[in-house]
Image (cartoon, rainbow, N blue to C red):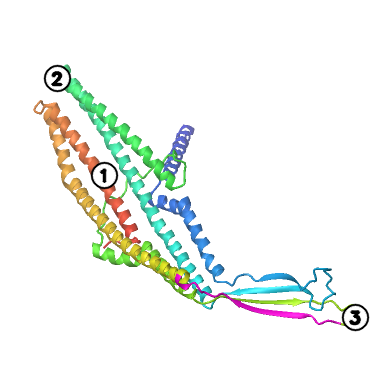
Amino acid sequence: MPPLFIFITGVYLGALLLVNDAIAGSEQNVLTLKAATELAVHNNPNLAQMRLRAEAMAAIPSQVGTLPDPVISFNAGNLPVNTFNTGQEDMTQIGPGISQAIPFPGKLALRSTAATFEAEAALKNVTEARWWLLSNVKQVWWQVFYLDNALQIVKNNQTLLKQFIQITRTKYEVGEGLQQDILLAQLELSNLLDQQIKLEGARRNSVAQLNALLDKAANQPVKLPAEIAEKLPTILSETALYQQAEHSRALLASKHESINAAQARVDLAKKDYYPDFKLGASYGFRRDRPTGIDRADLLTLNLSMSIPIFLDRKQAKAVDQRNSELMQQKYILQDDWNQVRAQISQNHSDFQRAKEQVILFKTGIIPQARQTVASMLAGYQVSQVDFLNLVRSQIALLNHELQYWNAFAEANQALANLAAAVGQEEIYE
């Protein structure tokens, strides 16, 4: 085999490997929607602090459901103040003591129960926050996706307008065109440049929002896939989504736990009508008499209890307070349920509207607009169509393509909100 052929083959293979490595590296840097949501769930600091709060609240029930710590004391009783001699008097005694507070039976269990329900509510709130974090990430991701497509459309139209300018200039040079057509095309090109600047600014802002949700530097570049499947799914009816949300929405489950906790606090307040107890014991050591006669040590036992004598002003008011808090939680649940159904209906409507727009633009308006532009361009080249109508038809096509991608992004954003409103991904037929 000739050496030159071997050399050329080696160079070609090396270049091919470099291209493949570049493509692979580029694909690795692409932020897919799935990767974005996974990063957010793993890295988002707000979700992390809510998890830690739930873990902290999970440690409360065993604390409040345990007896208070016993108290150890050291006692010196019946000391004669004239000499402070512990052997002078028969009743003088010195020794340790211990006491234990004991709430009325059932109070500790109710405190633990209320704290357990509150911890469960906090855990449900973590799930709720996770759903809305995913929704927010998807919202911004689809916004960036729309802006990428809008920028590509604007850049393509810039290239096309430059071709229009070249055609117009050629016609003008041979005396078949007008200078005002060239000026009009240049003006529209400048408008497209202005639109590009605005879109690029909006993209930078959206990328900063997305990076914040992913716990990354705001100015870190984000590259999205160039193409994705454009088919939109068919979703369940509003009534079916209501039924799913009633059982799967974490917000509603959290409020149910809050109601249970409020009910436990009502029961606990009623227990305060009964006394709490305190048991104690102390041991007193006594010194021998000066004559050498032994004196027996003494053991003291005591039982005390609280007397709830201010029932109308204290315990009864506490029960009223807890009942009001219970009713408050029930009304909060009712209001949240109304809001959940409103969210489902609104996003269901938004999705259906955007989906119909996507279908209309893709199958009707955009193909018709492209045919119009092609016909206008052909007519302009043979001087049967004026340049202003050609430019207007191209601008109309540009706007329709932007509206298509905007509707497509809005449909997917509505799906993200709908999944969060329902509390699960199974919202499709």
Of the two numbered discs 3 and 2 on the same chain, state the one appearing first in sequence.
2
Residue at the spot 84% in from the left edge and 76% down from the top edge: 287
Quadrant housing residue 419: bottom left
* Residue at the disc numbered 1: 406
Task: Locate residue 371, reporting x and y percent.
Answer: 15, 39
Q: Report if residue 268 lies within the magenta region.
A: no
Residue at the spot 81% in from the left edge and 77% down from the top edge: 286
Q: Can residue 111 be seen?
A: yes
* Residue at the disc numbered 3: 292
**As drawn, 61 above or below 136:** below
Please name whichever residue, 184 or 339, is drawn nearer the observer in this view of the structure.
Answer: 339
Of the two numbered discs 1 and 2 on the same chain, state the one appearing first in sequence.
2
Residue at the spot 90% in from the left edge and 77% down from the top edge: 290
Identify the magenta region.
294-312
Q: Residue furthest right?
A: 291
* Residue at the disc numbered 2: 178
Left or right? Give the position of 386 relative to 9: left
Task: Locate residue 72, reporting x and y percent.
Answer: 69, 70
User: Mark 1 or mark 2, which is nearer to you?
Assistant: 1
Q: Can residue 226 be seen?
A: no
Whole-Å distance between the Cαs marked 3 and 2? 136 Å
Looking at the rendered structure, the secondary structure element under dot 1 is helix
Instruction: Tell me if mark 3 has few (under 14), some (14-19) or many (20+) residues whose alpha carbon lies within 10 angstroms of its own.
Output: few
**As drawn, 119 above or below 387:** below
